């Protein structure tokens, strides 16, 4: 697929010229949505560029998504994560609601002591079955968490040791989170957790298991009682699943009311994209800027820095959301995508990153659109000077990237004109976090539509899974290349 036509021949003006030409630019390109300020004014987005876009294809695709129609063409199904927060086909919305009641009932039962004295939960899952819950619990549960939560994803025994060491088997529930209930890492770790419960003398280890899955029949086969299986729809993609039963550990630790508020925040963004004019559709505008950089200006990466430690897991959450969705080479029509699709997303936390990677951002040779995510209200107990300096640092970086400073000495020259977006939450709470995550989902979707790719499949990860199975089988192992076989031998496997 060639560069989207609205970008053809578009040459952005320097940021300083854009500000000079439009005294109202700072307000014009900043939007308030669900308690979050999205400031695009330090990107090269302009009214000119926005007006070039034919919004019809996006509007049609969005309407299909929100109506629960088939938008995942390669797998012939809908992408029904919006139904979890109330937008979709009436059946899907009703079913999601019923399943949420079931989740609430299970949480009520845990709180009422149906499983004895429970103090913690071991949540086992990987990818979309782990990253979302981990982000929610870390972002919202640092000060008030009703249960201890450990998220175990990696098959690495070190991760298993570390997670188990932090929990008491006598008072821990184990949630096995897997959309497919076939994922090798998750099942292996579930066995380890069962063995841990058994070895600790827990009377009925299987009675401690809860399944969060779109394949309840496999959870039953695994030995989990139907009453402790929280199902969700197969049409909810893994990386979009934190709104469903996959969010269970967050709902348990933060309370079901907080979880509902998270969904309400996301619903505000669903409503916004459904109703806003294209010129004011915040995720769409972000997607236009993204494509300007990746398609037209050939930026290969984009960086997200959380200027709030509670959001330190946001970059890794977004890596899956963005790269597993839009890291594609084929268009939705089955033809080669042509140019680049998704940017490579990376990031970190501020101010740490300023003292590590910002040199490249300020003076390196790559164009890297930067995104700052910060929270206006202080959420810590320290002297307010900390939060004040954190925010001032964040804003200063965006200003410095844009303004630069010229010098005859190249070593000391800062070229400037480097774009950044600032996302400033009034406060970090379940509603604003839900809105923030839904913003990123809709931005990813809009980008995919403009690129003509399907963001809802992920065939790319299948080959690696298949080879990981084949490499463990002596019969198929001989077909591997000499380098790989030598490594296996060297490791004594
Ligand atoms: O390997 C990629 C992937 O399929 C992701 O899309 C998914 O989030 C993750 O694995 C976990 O899959 P499951 O929830 O089925 O265990």
Image (cartoon, grey):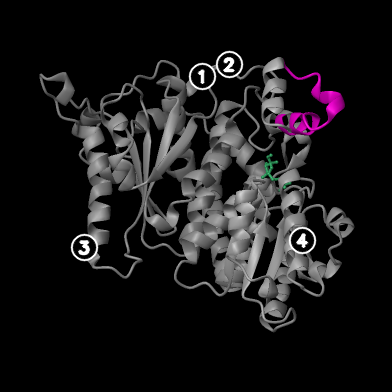
The mark that comes first in sequence, 1 or 4, is: 1
Q: Residue at x 80, y 29 (%)?
A: 470
Q: Which of marks 1 and 4 is in front?
A: 4
Q: Which residue is drawn at 67% across and 81% down?
A: 117
Residue 40 forms part of the magenta stretch: no
The location of residue 19, given as percent across then percent down, is: 22, 34
The mark that comes first in sequence, 3 or 4, is: 4
| Gap between marks 1 and 2 measured at Cα | 8 Å
| Gap between marks 3 and 4 measured at Cα | 49 Å
The image's mark for residue 338 is: 2
Q: Residue at x 75, y 81 (%)?
A: 114
Instruction: Give the quadrant of ligand 1.
Output: top right
Above or below 94: residue 101 = below
Q: Main secondary structure of the magenta part?
A: helix
Q: What stretch is highlighted in magenta?
A: 464-481
The mark that comes first in sequence, 2 or 4, is: 4
Which residue bears the numbered disc 4?
Answer: 195
Apparent side of residue 327 relative to residue 314 in the rendered image (left or right): right
Which residue bears the numbered disc 1?
Answer: 3
Apparent side of residue 94 relative to residue 128 in the rendered image (left or right): right
Q: Which of marks 2 and 4 is in front?
A: 4
The mark that comes first in sequence, 2 or 3, is: 2
| Gap between marks 1 and 4 measured at Cα | 53 Å
Q: Quadrant of the N terminus?
A: top right
């Amino acid at each position: 697929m060639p560069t989207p036509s609205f970008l053809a021949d578009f040459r952005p003006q320097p940021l300083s010229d854009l500000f000079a030409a439009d005294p109202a630019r700072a307000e014009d390109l900043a939007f308030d949505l669900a308690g979050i300020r999205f400031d695009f004014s330090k990107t090269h987005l302009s009214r000119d560029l926005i007006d070039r876009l034919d919004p019809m294809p996006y509007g049609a695709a969005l309407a299909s998504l929100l109506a629960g129609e088939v938008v995942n063409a390669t797998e012939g199904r809908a992408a029904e994560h919006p139904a979890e927060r109330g937008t979709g086909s009436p059946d899907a919305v009703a079913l999601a609601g019923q399943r949420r009641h079931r989740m609430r009932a299970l949480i009520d039962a845990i709180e009422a002591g149906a499983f004895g004295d429970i103090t913690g939960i071991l949540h086992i899952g990987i990818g979309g079955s782990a990253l979302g819950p981990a982000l929610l619990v870390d972002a919202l549960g640092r000060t008030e968490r009703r249960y201890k939560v450990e998220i175990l994803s990696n098959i690495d025994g070190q991760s298993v040791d570390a997670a188990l060491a932090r929990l008491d088997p006598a008072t821990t529930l184990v949630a096995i989170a897997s959309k497919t209930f076939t994922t090798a890492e998750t099942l292996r770790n579930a066995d380890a957790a069962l063995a841990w419960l058994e070895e600790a003398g827990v009377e009925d280890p299987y009675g401690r298991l809860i399944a969060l899955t779109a394949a309840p029949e496999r959870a039953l086969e695994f030995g989990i009682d139907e009453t402790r299986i929280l199902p969700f729809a197969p049409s909810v993609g893994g990386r979009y699943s934190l709104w469903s039963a996959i969010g269970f550990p967050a709902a348990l630790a933060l309370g079901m009311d907080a979880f509902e508020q998270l969904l309400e925040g996301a619903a505000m963004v669903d409503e916004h994209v459904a109703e806003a004019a294209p010129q004011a559709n915040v995720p769409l505008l972000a997607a236009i800027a993204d494509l300007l950089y990746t398609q037209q200006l050939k930026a290969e990466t984009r960086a997200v820095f959380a200027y709030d430690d509670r959001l330190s897991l946001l970059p890794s959450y977004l890596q899956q959301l963005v790269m597993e969705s839009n890291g594609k080479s084929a268009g939705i029509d089955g033809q080669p995508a042509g140019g680049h699709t998704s940017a490579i997303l990376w990031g970190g936390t501020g101010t740490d990153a300023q003292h590590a990677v910002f040199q490249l951002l300020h003076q390196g040779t790559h164009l890297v659109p930067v995104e700052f995510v910060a929270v206006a209200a202080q959420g810590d107990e320290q002297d307010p000077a900390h939060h004040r300096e954190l925010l001032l640092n964040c804003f200063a970086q965006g200003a410095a990237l844009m303004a630069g400073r010229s010098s005859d000495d190249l070593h000391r020259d800062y070229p400037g004109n480097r774009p950044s977006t600032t996302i400033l939450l009034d406060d970090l709470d379940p509603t604003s976090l839900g809105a923030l995550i839904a913003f990123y989902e809709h931005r990813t979707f809009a980008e995919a539509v403009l690129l003509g790719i399907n963001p809802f499949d992920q065939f790319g990860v299948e080959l690696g899974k298949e080879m990981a199975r084949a490499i463990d089988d002596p019969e198929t192992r001989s077909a591997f290349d000499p380098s790989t076989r030598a490594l296996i031998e060297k490791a004594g496997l």
